[in-house]
Amino acid sequence: MSGVPTSFHLGPLDFHTYGFGLAIAAYVAYLYSRHRLARAHFDVESFGRFAGVLIFSGLVGARIANIATNWSYYNGHPGRWLAVWQGGLASFGGIALALPVAITLQRRWWPQSSLARFSDAVLPALVLGWAIGRFLGPQFMVNGGGHITHQWFGIRYEGQSGKRVPVPIIQGIEDGLLWGLLVVIEKKWTTRVAGLLSAIAMMIWGLVRAYDEHWLLGDESHSGSLGVQFAGLTLAIAGVVIFVRQYVVQHRHGVLQESDA
């Protein structure tokens, strides 16, 4: 076992440890996002509502994607559709629904600012929240590990036989390193062309997520696994397109300057 129980009881109620971990990660991401937006001179009065709607839409999208990719399990059992306490959230499904919701709300509540500037302010906070979430969420859930391994770093997870590759820990480290890289890039350069920071985050995170799914976690015959790999590569390609476009703008106008700090 990973050392922490996957659930605990309080009277008649059954609480899942990973849920508390994800809640902590979401709260940290919220506070950090709010701080970064305020530092970038955004009005943060509406950010609480924005974050609430975004979290809800992300959960709905993640659940819908999980149901769609595991239809044989859910077909004929509508009661299972809402049983989120039994697990079953697909991260890219959450992103797929939360992204258009975020764009719509950003244009409505911060129409004076570009989406690129808003994204540059928020994305590093989301990456940090994701890193914390991997350590405190999937690490303590049933079937949280990756492929079986006989290496020293293997960990036993409830619901899985043998030692498993500790994918949540690996992804937490990966996302933590990405967050650190984004902070360094942000401090190293004064970027007047918005969107470059977001593009870098999209490229790296998408590629790493696809790699992890293919080599450490996924099952090639499973549609959900293939979907994650495809979504990761698509996100990375979108990041490349944005980066190239912004890089061309940067060279055309000469507005990317290295800071003296």
Image (cartoon, helix red, strand yellow):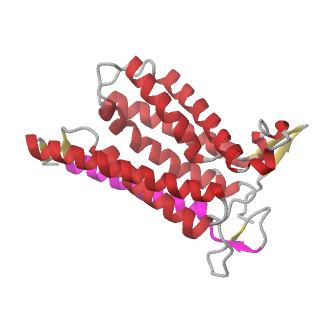
Res 37 quadrant in image: top left
Left or right: residue 85 compared with residue 201: right
Picture coordinates of residue 56, whole percent (x, y): 61, 30
Report the predominant secondary structure element of the magenta stretch. Answer: helix
Picture coordinates of residue 150, whole percent (x, y): 67, 81
Picture coordinates of residue 185, whole percent (x, y): 27, 51
Left or right: residue 195 compared with residue 66: left
Q: Is residue 138 magenta?
A: no
Nearer the observer, 69 or 111: 69
Nearer the observer, 193 or 175: 193
Residue drawn 77% across and 42% down?
Answer: 85
Is residue 137 shown above or below 208?
above
Residue drawn 40% across and 22% down?
Answer: 44
Is residue 78 shown above or below 113?
below
Residue drawn 40% across and 37% down?
Answer: 122
Left or right: residue 244 compared with residue 64: left
Nearer the observer, 167 or 25: 167
Is residue 42 shown above or below 62?
above
Residue 129 can be seen, yes or no: yes
Picture coordinates of residue 21, whole percent (x, y): 64, 46
Q: Is residue 188 magenta?
A: yes
Is residue 6 shown above or below 105?
below
Residue extent of the magenta highlight: 162-189
Left or right: residue 193 compared with residue 198: left
Residue 179 can be seen, yes or no: no
Residue drawn 43% across and 41% down?
Answer: 125
Count how many numbered circles sit on residues in the image. 0
What quarter of the picture does the N terminus occupy?
A: bottom right
